[in-house]
Image (cartoon, rainbow, N blue to C red):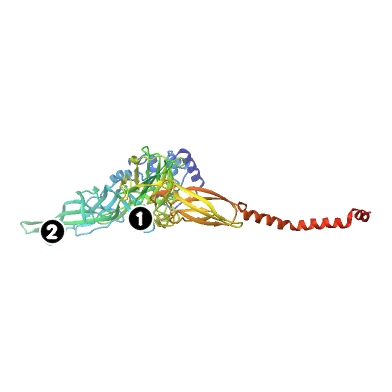
Amino acid sequence: MTQRELSVLIAGLLATSLVTGIVAADTPRPGTEGNGLTENESATLWSRDADNYITQEEYRQRYGENRSAFHQVANGTDITFKRPPATAATWTRNDFENLDAGGPDTSVHPPHADLEDGVFIEDAHATIFAVQPSTRGHLESGETPLYIAPNGTMRGFVDYRVRVPNGSSSGNTTISWSLTKHEIEEVRLKKNGDTIAERDGSHTPALDYQIEDDWSANLTLEAEISVRLKKTVRTDQGNRTDVDVTYRTESRNASDSIAVEIYDLSAYPYYAEYPNGDAGVAIFQSRPWQGYTLTEDGEARVRGIWRFYTARNTNWDTLVRSNRTDTATVESDAIPVYVNAYPSRIGPRAEPVRNGPELIETWGTDRPSPVGIIGENINIDIVNQSYTTTYGVAVRAENVNREALHIAGIVRDVNASIVEPDAGSERQLRRSNLTVEVIQQNQSQTTLRVELLDNQTGAPIGLNDSRQYPIGGTTRNGYITVADQRLETNASGVAIVTINEPGIYKGRYHPGSWLGHDPAYVSDTATVRWHPLGTIDGWFALVFEIGWQLLPFFVMFYAGKRLLRMLGPEDIFQRNS
């Protein structure tokens, strides 16, 4: 974002600063915590905070310091990104270190934790803190998958408390209990019930995983917790005391699960060369993806409909501290932040905007807008009506370096492996030859013959046949327009059209996209002129029409001459005198 863009945005915020949203939990001020981010980077994280803008002067009075331009912008709106940023994972990884367990007498857990209770173990939980790299996709209502990288890290929080029974005394017998050992023995990460990673017990485990050849999965964080208590029974026998020591042990498994989509991206490229030397590139992928670059320096690029914002997981805004006698809710010192993908009103774009690639076609699945599920206090340019997912994006560009083609996904650092389509990736793109000629005419109409040929081979181009669409989208066979009429040539490449108004007519061939045809063609035009005077009948009709229109004048002229001859010049003079 340039300084000029920041200035414009800040001016808009000043004009609308009286509009406030629902107050959300306060997020850390940028620069107040060492989380591996700069002040500007941390300012962009909090898309779910209340954008209650305050002026620079108010901020200075409240906190005794100035803020950066990015921080000022983020105070009044939310920052979005063209590509999934690394800031969410950096913050989460560092903030995770601030998560502390409560000790044997106290269990610390988020409010949404699934608690396990036993005889001696209580309020036990193993709760997923974050899985990263990942992106939460907002596709439509009821469909918000969490896409995770095939290689990543799951972080979790495990805690519990031990209930040590109270001692008792009855007669000459005294019973006492003491805790001798408690531990998290092992932490496991399971995929659909199978263990894929494990480590020694920890309250804050970080488990690296690698998942291959899976589309979706259910990931489970599981912790095995065990305690050992000593029970001592003392019996007073007068001159001696008998002591009986026994040990009681208990183990509990605590777990938490999350449904994920394994974002292992494979893309299918298609290429074409235009007759003038331009290159055509189309990329298709069956999942949401970010875009691709066409040159080694990355300057020429195209992106689909998806943009990104970062927001905290509000489930971790507070923590519950529970012990034997009390429960208290406290503010959390650790907040996970996730990347979120959404369909943007900006839509697909090619860059550089003025002299970069030309976006020629996109295709995908039509979906309703997810605006109703995006949540409160999120101010982004999300589509507010139905949209088309950009599973396929095609461009035309002057320069394309196929070796440098780079296809990026909506999950950070996940780039697509390029897969050669079964039918090959090359599409033939040829010149066409359109001719239009008059074959029959009279004074009221003319009949035109339109012919469309392959300029290279001379073969006819038929437009009324059904050809397979080899990449994706809706079939479009191309058409010709003449005199506002839409034509399709037959198998011989010929179409006939009749027009009734004289004039100059331009025929244009609107070819079907090279994405759907092989071979495909570029547009061509042809011009034809028709006027009734172009025929003998037309000239005869013109003379007849003119004569018919002038007939009253001829009659009047003839009658006047006859009257002058009858009266003579002398009679006229005498009458006038």
* Left or right: 536, with 326 as reference point: right
Of the 4 image quadrants, the one containing the C terminus is bottom right
Q: Secondary structure at mark 1?
A: loop
In the rendered image, the vertical position of residue 13 relative to residue 167, given as above or below: above
* Left or right: 188, with 519 as reference point: left
Q: Residues within 10 Å of mark 1 (few under 14, many from 20)?
A: some
Tell me where residue 477 appears, x and y as whole percent.
Answer: 43, 54
Q: Could you say which is closer to the camera, residue 452 or residue 302?
A: 452
Q: Secondary structure at mark 2?
A: strand
Of the 4 image quadrants, the one containing the N terminus is top left
Tell me where residue 166 appears, x and y as whole percent.
Answer: 19, 58
Q: Amino acid at mark 2?
A: Thr
The residue furthest left is: 239
Mark 2 or mark 1: whose residue is earlier in sequence: 1
Q: Are marks 2 and 1 in contact (CB under 8 Å)?
A: no
Discs 2/1, front: 1
Tell me where residue 497 appears, x and y as whole percent.
Answer: 52, 56
Q: Amino acid at mark 1?
A: Thr
What mark, if any, has residue 235 been given in the picture? none
Q: Could you say which is closer to the camera, residue 351 or residue 545?
A: 545
Q: Could you say which is closer to the camera, residue 477 or residue 280?
A: 477
Residue placed under numbered mark 2 in the picture: 174
At a point 43% along the width and 57% down the height, the residue shown is 464
* Left or right: 393, with 505 as reference point: left
Residue placed under numbered mark 1 in the picture: 144
Tell me where residue 483 appears, x and y as whole percent.
Answer: 55, 54
Question: Can residue 177 be seen from the camera position used here?
Answer: yes
Q: Residues within 10 Å of mark 2 (few under 14, many from 20)?
A: some
Question: Can residue 74 be seen from the camera position used here?
Answer: no
